[in-house]
Image (spheres, rainbow, N blue to C red):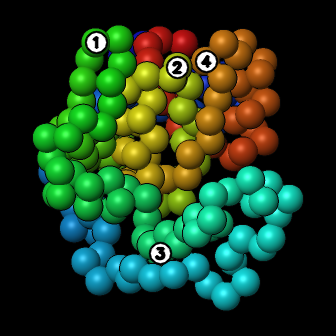
Protein backbone atom coordinates (compact mmCIF):
# COMPACT_ATOMS: atom_id res chain seq x y z
CA UNK A 1 0.00 0.00 0.00
CA UNK A 2 1.11 3.58 -0.69
CA UNK A 3 1.35 6.42 1.78
CA UNK A 4 -2.14 7.52 2.79
CA UNK A 5 -3.85 4.49 1.26
CA UNK A 6 -6.98 3.22 2.99
CA UNK A 7 -7.45 -0.26 4.33
CA UNK A 8 -11.07 -1.15 5.05
CA UNK A 9 -10.22 -4.23 7.12
CA UNK A 10 -9.63 -2.41 10.41
CA UNK A 11 -12.94 -2.86 12.19
CA UNK A 12 -14.97 -1.27 9.38
CA UNK A 13 -13.00 1.94 9.75
CA UNK A 14 -10.69 3.29 7.12
CA UNK A 15 -7.19 3.43 8.52
CA UNK A 16 -4.56 5.53 6.84
CA UNK A 17 -1.12 4.08 6.55
CA UNK A 18 1.91 6.26 6.95
CA UNK A 19 5.42 4.88 6.84
CA UNK A 20 7.15 6.26 9.88
CA UNK A 21 8.93 9.57 9.38
CA UNK A 22 8.60 10.09 5.64
CA UNK A 23 6.17 13.02 5.38
CA UNK A 24 6.96 16.73 5.40
CA UNK A 25 4.69 19.78 5.38
CA UNK A 26 4.84 22.98 7.48
CA UNK A 27 3.63 22.46 11.05
CA UNK A 28 0.79 24.85 11.96
CA UNK A 29 1.22 26.96 15.10
CA UNK A 30 -1.75 25.18 16.73
CA UNK A 31 0.16 21.88 16.60
CA UNK A 32 3.47 23.21 17.91
CA UNK A 33 2.38 23.49 21.54
CA UNK A 34 1.91 26.67 23.47
CA UNK A 35 4.91 28.69 24.55
CA UNK A 36 3.31 29.40 27.92
CA UNK A 37 3.04 25.80 29.15
CA UNK A 38 3.91 25.71 32.83
CA UNK A 39 6.70 23.70 34.42
CA UNK A 40 6.05 22.68 37.95
CA UNK A 41 5.94 20.01 40.61
CA UNK A 42 3.49 17.14 40.71
CA UNK A 43 0.10 17.95 42.25
CA UNK A 44 -0.28 17.29 45.99
CA UNK A 45 -0.56 13.63 46.81
CA UNK A 46 1.30 12.55 43.65
CA UNK A 47 4.67 12.01 45.36
CA UNK A 48 5.88 8.51 46.15
CA UNK A 49 4.98 7.19 49.58
CA UNK A 50 7.32 5.04 51.65
CA UNK A 51 7.92 1.67 49.96
CA UNK A 52 9.70 -1.44 51.15
CA UNK A 53 12.52 -1.03 48.58
CA UNK A 54 13.38 2.43 49.85
CA UNK A 55 15.43 0.85 52.65
CA UNK A 56 17.96 -0.19 49.98
CA UNK A 57 18.47 3.36 48.71
CA UNK A 58 21.65 5.12 49.73
CA UNK A 59 21.20 7.85 52.36
CA UNK A 60 19.98 11.11 50.86
CA UNK A 61 18.76 9.55 47.57
CA UNK A 62 15.51 11.00 46.30
CA UNK A 63 12.60 8.59 46.40
CA UNK A 64 10.55 10.30 43.75
CA UNK A 65 11.02 12.81 40.99
CA UNK A 66 9.02 15.83 39.95
CA UNK A 67 8.22 16.06 36.27
CA UNK A 68 7.24 19.20 34.40
CA UNK A 69 3.59 19.57 33.58
CA UNK A 70 4.06 19.67 29.82
CA UNK A 71 3.45 17.43 26.82
CA UNK A 72 6.25 14.89 26.53
CA UNK A 73 7.23 16.14 23.05
CA UNK A 74 8.02 19.53 24.60
CA UNK A 75 10.53 17.78 26.86
CA UNK A 76 12.16 16.37 23.74
CA UNK A 77 12.21 19.85 22.19
CA UNK A 78 13.78 21.32 25.33
CA UNK A 79 16.54 18.71 25.28
CA UNK A 80 17.06 19.31 21.54
CA UNK A 81 17.51 23.05 22.18
CA UNK A 82 19.91 22.40 25.09
CA UNK A 83 21.99 19.66 23.45
CA UNK A 84 21.16 19.33 19.75
CA UNK A 85 24.27 17.26 19.01
CA UNK A 86 23.97 14.89 21.99
CA UNK A 87 23.05 11.36 20.89
CA UNK A 88 19.41 10.59 21.71
CA UNK A 89 19.15 7.18 20.02
CA UNK A 90 21.75 4.59 19.11
CA UNK A 91 20.49 1.58 17.16
CA UNK A 92 22.66 -0.93 15.30
CA UNK A 93 25.35 1.61 14.53
CA UNK A 94 22.87 4.38 13.64
CA UNK A 95 23.07 7.42 15.92
CA UNK A 96 20.45 10.15 15.99
CA UNK A 97 21.17 13.33 17.96
CA UNK A 98 18.40 15.15 19.83
CA UNK A 99 18.22 17.98 17.28
CA UNK A 100 17.68 15.55 14.43
CA UNK A 101 15.22 13.44 16.43
CA UNK A 102 13.10 16.49 17.23
CA UNK A 103 13.12 17.48 13.53
CA UNK A 104 12.11 13.97 12.45
CA UNK A 105 9.22 13.93 14.91
CA UNK A 106 8.04 17.29 13.56
CA UNK A 107 8.11 15.82 10.02
CA UNK A 108 6.06 12.86 11.23
CA UNK A 109 3.53 15.14 12.90
CA UNK A 110 3.36 17.31 9.79
CA UNK A 111 2.65 14.27 7.62
CA UNK A 112 -0.12 13.04 9.91
CA UNK A 113 -1.72 16.48 10.04
CA UNK A 114 -1.50 16.81 6.25
CA UNK A 115 -3.30 13.49 5.92
CA UNK A 116 -6.12 14.71 8.16
CA UNK A 117 -5.26 13.58 11.69
CA UNK A 118 -7.29 15.57 14.18
CA UNK A 119 -6.51 16.20 17.84
CA UNK A 120 -7.76 13.31 19.94
CA UNK A 121 -7.64 10.75 17.11
CA UNK A 122 -6.32 7.42 18.30
CA UNK A 123 -3.36 6.16 16.30
CA UNK A 124 -2.16 2.57 16.39
CA UNK A 125 1.64 2.30 16.12
CA UNK A 126 2.67 -1.08 14.73
CA UNK A 127 6.43 -0.60 14.48
CA UNK A 128 9.18 -2.70 16.07
CA UNK A 129 11.47 -1.24 18.73
CA UNK A 130 13.60 1.05 16.59
CA UNK A 131 14.20 4.73 15.89
CA UNK A 132 11.11 4.60 13.64
CA UNK A 133 8.97 3.73 16.69
CA UNK A 134 10.34 6.65 18.70
CA UNK A 135 9.77 9.02 15.77
CA UNK A 136 6.21 7.76 15.26
CA UNK A 137 5.41 7.95 19.00
CA UNK A 138 6.56 11.54 19.42
CA UNK A 139 5.11 12.51 16.03
CA UNK A 140 1.64 11.24 16.96
CA UNK A 141 1.75 13.07 20.30
CA UNK A 142 3.03 16.26 18.66
CA UNK A 143 0.14 16.16 16.17
CA UNK A 144 -2.36 15.80 19.03
CA UNK A 145 -3.07 12.10 18.58
CA UNK A 146 -3.39 9.40 21.21
CA UNK A 147 -0.98 6.49 20.87
CA UNK A 148 -2.23 2.90 20.90
CA UNK A 149 0.67 0.44 20.80
CA UNK A 150 0.26 -2.64 18.59
CA UNK A 151 2.60 -5.63 18.62
CA UNK A 152 4.14 -5.78 15.13
CA UNK A 153 3.72 -9.56 15.17
CA UNK A 154 -0.07 -9.43 15.52
CA UNK A 155 -2.20 -10.97 12.79
CA UNK A 156 -5.13 -9.27 11.08
CA UNK A 157 -7.84 -10.44 13.49
CA UNK A 158 -5.83 -9.14 16.47
CA UNK A 159 -5.26 -5.80 14.77
CA UNK A 160 -8.98 -5.56 13.94
CA UNK A 161 -9.87 -6.25 17.58
CA UNK A 162 -7.48 -3.58 18.85
CA UNK A 163 -8.77 -1.06 16.30
CA UNK A 164 -12.36 -1.64 17.39
CA UNK A 165 -11.53 -1.76 21.10
CA UNK A 166 -9.39 1.40 21.09
CA UNK A 167 -11.43 3.36 18.56
CA UNK A 168 -8.28 3.90 16.48
CA UNK A 169 -8.84 5.43 13.06
CA UNK A 170 -5.18 5.42 12.03
CA UNK A 171 -2.31 2.98 11.95
CA UNK A 172 1.39 3.69 11.49
CA UNK A 173 3.42 0.76 10.23
CA UNK A 174 7.04 0.21 9.31
CA UNK A 175 5.89 -1.12 5.94
CA UNK A 176 2.88 -2.60 4.23
CA UNK A 177 0.28 -4.60 6.10
Seen from the viewer's position, the closer of residues 105 and 93 is: 93
Of mark 3 and mark 1, the one earlier in the sequence is 3
Of mark 3 and mark 2, the one earlier in the sequence is 3
Residue 159 appears in view = yes
Residue 69's disc is: 3
User: Residue under circle 2?
Assistant: 128
Residue 152's disc is: 4
- Give the quadrant of the C terminus: top right
Q: Residue furthest right?
A: 52
Q: How many angstroms separate mark 1 from mark 2 (CA)?
A: 17 Å
The residue sitting at 32% across, 53% down in the picture is 76
Q: How many angstroms separate mark 4 from mark 1 (CA)?
A: 22 Å
Q: Position of residue 70 (x, y in %)?
A: 43, 71
Q: Residue furthest front?
A: 59
Q: Is residue 123 left or right of residue 167?
A: left
The residue sitting at 30% across, 42% down in the picture is 105
Q: Are marks 4 and 2 in contact (CB under 8 Å)?
A: yes
Q: Secondary structure at mark 1?
A: loop
10 Å crowding of disc 4: few (<14), some (14-19), many (20+): some
Q: Position of residue 88 (x, y in %)?
A: 30, 37
Q: Secondary structure at mark 3?
A: loop
Q: Secondary structure at mark 2?
A: loop
10 Å crowding of disc 3: few (<14), some (14-19), many (20+): some
Quarter of the rendering containing residue 34 = bottom left
Of mark 1 and mark 2, the one earlier in the sequence is 1
Amino acid sequence: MRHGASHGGLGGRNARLVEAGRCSVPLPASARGGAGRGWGPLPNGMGMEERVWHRFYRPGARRSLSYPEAPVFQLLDARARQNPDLIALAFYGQQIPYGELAALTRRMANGLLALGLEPGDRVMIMVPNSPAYVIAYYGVLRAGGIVTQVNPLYVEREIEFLARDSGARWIVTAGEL
